[in-house]
Amino acid sequence: MSRVLEHYNYLHEIPELGFQEFKTSAYISQQLKNAGFVVQDNFNGTTGIVAILDSGIPGPTLALRADMDALGHIIDGVHCARHTCGHDGHSSVVLSAAEELIAGHEVKRGRLKLIFQPAEELGAGALAMIAGGAIDDVDMILGFHVRPAQECAVGTAIPAVHYSACVTLEAIIYGQAAHGARPHLGVNALDAAVSAVQAVNAVHLAPDSGWSVKATRFICDAGVTNSIPDEARVVFDLRTAKNEDMVELQARVQRAVEHSVAAYGAKANVTVVKSMPAAVIDDEMTALIAQAIVDVQGEAALMPVRSTPGSEDFFQYPVQRPEVKAGFWGLGTGLLPGLHHPDMHFDLASLPVGVKIFKACVRRVLG
């Protein structure tokens, strides 16, 4: 009997932000040790976990990756953590699959490696695991994500989800303070920041490229209403379907910000807050996942490969280690009203299906 709902119900009630997943990590680690895995806690000085099952027989090393962190929300004026991206479901599915695989002695050759990763939402968790050597000995890595109802119905699954590259830029714009009665003696950072937003809105890549850029945060407050503000902060969200297009888009946005504020006599310091690459998915791994979906649910459940403008730091693994074959799939869960929505919910009956699909993948590679 799968324990996936038991794991989910516990993890769902203890949401923790990136690199602060202390209770989450402790719970997952203990379950893995109880099951018989060799476990490395506090991987690379983080809350990350790496667990290994070595068959003792020559063969490939297959890694299953799950993210653990929740999102920070402001709900009814209160800052809180809440699982609104399904990472509690991801961890529960991979943990349950691991328990069942070791209990059933289904790893016949090679090694099964489990990576429970912190801070996906910060775009830093995968990089921390990679820097610690988590995939230095890995041949293949698989990850997944619960999908919105609009993309993938309950009872179906997508063998490959091609995520977009995403870069978050913050522009700190510096002007010069002055009295509101004497604006000519200052440089209005608010005016300059508004100009920067307009300039970025005028940036364009080729129409046949999948891309977008928009301002998502604007902060400017001198503390009084009759003073010219000397500082403003604007955050921009950049997305492209291809990694090479992100290089061009990022350069154009930075240039637009710097030149537009300069016209006001202001200066801008533009920094990267978060960066996630576009998907790099191996065709062989997509075929493996597709076969596993059919094994578990039949041909009718297999959905076409699709793209999404969302981003995922999972793809740091194949980008940073191109020799590792990566696959990333989507599980139909009836998720509504949408990812990152404070009221996000999905059909929990879909989680045991996710467990079975991962087990089918592992059997095909290591069984």
Image (cartoon, rainbow, N blue to C red):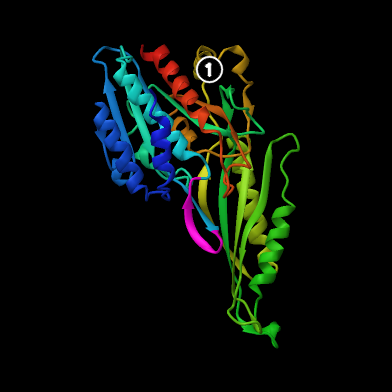
Q: Which residues are magenta?
A: 75-83
Residue 31 horizontal side relative to residue 94, left or right: left
Q: Quadrant of residue 6?
A: top left
Location of the N terminus (image quadrant)? top left
Seen from the viewer's position, the closer of residues 298 and 234 is 298
Residue 226 horizontal side relative to residue 48, left or right: right
Taking the magenta stretch, the answer to whether it contains residue 79 is yes
Q: Kindly give the residue lying farthest to the bottom in the view shown.
A: 181
Q: Is residue 341 above or below residue 299?
A: below
Identify which residue is drawn at 52% across, 28% down.
350
- Please state the horizontal and vertical placement of residue 143, each as a whole percent of the image: 46, 29
- Please state the horizontal and vertical placement of residue 235, each as a whole percent of the image: 59, 57
Residue 320 horizontal side relative to residue 43, left or right: right
- Please state the horizontal and vertical placement of residue 42, each as a whole percent of the image: 28, 43
Q: Residues within 10 Å of mark 1 (few under 14, many from 20)?
A: many
Seen from the viewer's position, the closer of residues 196 and 265 is 196
**In terms of secondary structure, where does tag 1 sit?**
helix
Of the residues shown, which amino acid type is indicated by label 1?
Ile
Q: Is residue 38 visible?
A: no
Q: Is residue 232 above or below residue 142?
A: below
Q: Is residue 235 visible?
A: yes
Taking the magenta stretch, the answer to whether it contains residue 117 is no
Magenta highlight: main SS: strand
Residue 94 horizontal side relative to residue 341, left or right: left
- Please state the horizontal and vertical placement of residue 164, each as a whole percent of the image: 60, 37
Seen from the viewer's position, the closer of residues 158 and 88 is 88
Seen from the viewer's position, the closer of residues 133 and 61 is 61
Q: Which residue is mark 1?
A: 293
